[in-house]
C-alpha cells in the first residue's frame, strides 16, 4: 500500500494525463481512466516476468521512445484544449472508453511500469507467492487498491479546484500540456541516448 500511495502521488506522465483529461472532460468521464493500469499492467507484468528477461537490452529504450511520442501527442491535445474556453460540465471531447484507452496506452508505452515490475514489485510478488499464493496476491491487491484510490483522489481534487476558479482551468490545462511535453521529450531523449 505504501508503494501504491507513493506511485499515485509522484508527479509523472500519468498524473499529467489525468490533469488534462479532468479539465477537458470533467471528473465523471476521467474517473474510469484511473483504472487504466489494471488494463495495461497485466501484459506488462507478463512481459517483465517472462519475455523481458529474454529480449535485447534496447527493447525497453524503444518502448520509451514510442511512449515519448505518444506523450507529445497527448500534450498537443491538452494545449489545444487550453486555448479554448473550458467548461467542465459542457465541453466533452473524449468518451469514457477512449479516455481509458489513452490512459492504458500511455501506461504501456512508459518505461516506469516495466522498471517498477522488473526491479521492485516483481521480486516482491514472486517471493510472497513462494511463501503463500495469498501473500503474493495480497501485495498486488493492496498496491492496485491504493494507487487507484490515489488517482481518484487526484481527479476529484483537480475538479474541485477548477470549480472554485473556472479561469484556473486554462492555466491548469497549460501546465498539463507543458508537463506532458517535457515528460515526452525526456523519454525520447533518454531512450535515444541509451540506444546510441
Image (tube, rainbow, N blue to C red):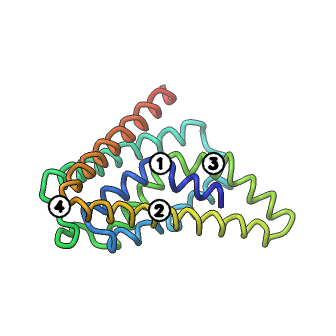
Question: Which residue was labeled with disc 1?
Answer: 110
Which residue in the protein does label 3 denote?
52
Residue 140 is situated, as x and y percent measured from the top left of the image, at 67, 65
List x then y, in percent, for residue 167.
18, 55
As measured in the structure, the alpha-carbon distance from the residue carrying label 4 to the one carrying label 1 is 28 Å
- Return the disc, 2 or 3, that comes first in the chain's sequence: 3
Q: Residues within 10 Å of mark 1 (few under 14, many from 20)?
A: many
Q: CA distance from mark 2 to mark 3?
A: 28 Å
Q: Could you tell me how far apart the alpha carbons at marks 1 and 2 are, in whole angstroms?
A: 17 Å
Mark 3 is surrounded, within 10 Å at the Cα level, by few (under 14), some (14 to 19) or many (20 or more) other residues, namely some
**71 or 171: nearer the viewer:** 171
Residue 2 vs residue 149: left or right? right
Query: Residue tagged by mark 4?
Result: 86
Residue 110: horizontal and vertical position, in percent? 47, 48
Q: Secondary structure at mark 1?
A: loop
Give the left or right position of residue 11, taking residue 84 as reference.
right
Q: Nearer the viewer, mark 4 or mark 3?
A: 4
| Quadrant position of residue 32 | bottom left
Q: Are marks 3 and 1 in contact (CB under 8 Å)?
A: no
CB contact under 8 Å: marks 1 and 2: no
Compared with 183, 49 (above or below) is below
Amino acid at each position: 500500500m505504501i508503494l501504491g500511495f507513493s506511485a499515485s502521488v509522484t508527479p509523472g506522465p500519468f498524473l499529467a494525463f489525468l490533469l488534462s483529461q479532468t479539465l477537458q472532460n470533467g471528473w465523471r468521464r476521467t474517473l474510469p481512466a484511473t483504472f487504466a493500469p489494471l488494463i495495461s499492467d497485466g501484459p506488462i507484468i507478463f512481459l517483465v516476468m517472462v519475455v523481458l528477461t529474454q529480449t535485447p537490452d534496447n527493447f525497453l529504450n524503444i518502448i520509451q521512445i514510442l511512449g515519448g511520442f505518444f506523450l507529445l501527442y497527448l500534450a498537443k491535445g491538452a494545449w489545444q484544449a487550453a486555448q479554448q474556453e473550458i467548461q467542465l460540465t459542457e465541453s466533452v471531447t473524449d468518451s469514457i472508453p477512449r479516455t481509458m484507452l489513452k490512459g492504458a496506452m500511455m501506461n504501456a508505452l512508459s518505461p516506469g511500469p516495466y522498471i517498477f515490475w522488473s526491479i521492485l514489485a516483481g521480486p516482491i510478488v514472486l517471493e510472497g507467492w513462494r511463501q503463500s499464493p495469498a501473500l503474493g496476491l495480497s501485495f498486488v491487491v493492496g498496491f492496485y487498491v491504493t494507487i487507484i484510490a490515489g488517482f481518484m483522489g487526484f481527479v476529484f481534487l483537480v475538479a474541485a479546484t477548477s470549480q472554485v476558479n473556472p479561469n484556473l482551468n486554462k492555466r491548469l490545462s497549460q501546465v498539463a500540456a507543458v508537463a506532458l511535453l517535457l515528460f515526452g521529450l525526456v523519454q525520447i531523449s533518454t531512450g535515444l541516448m541509451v540506444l546510441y
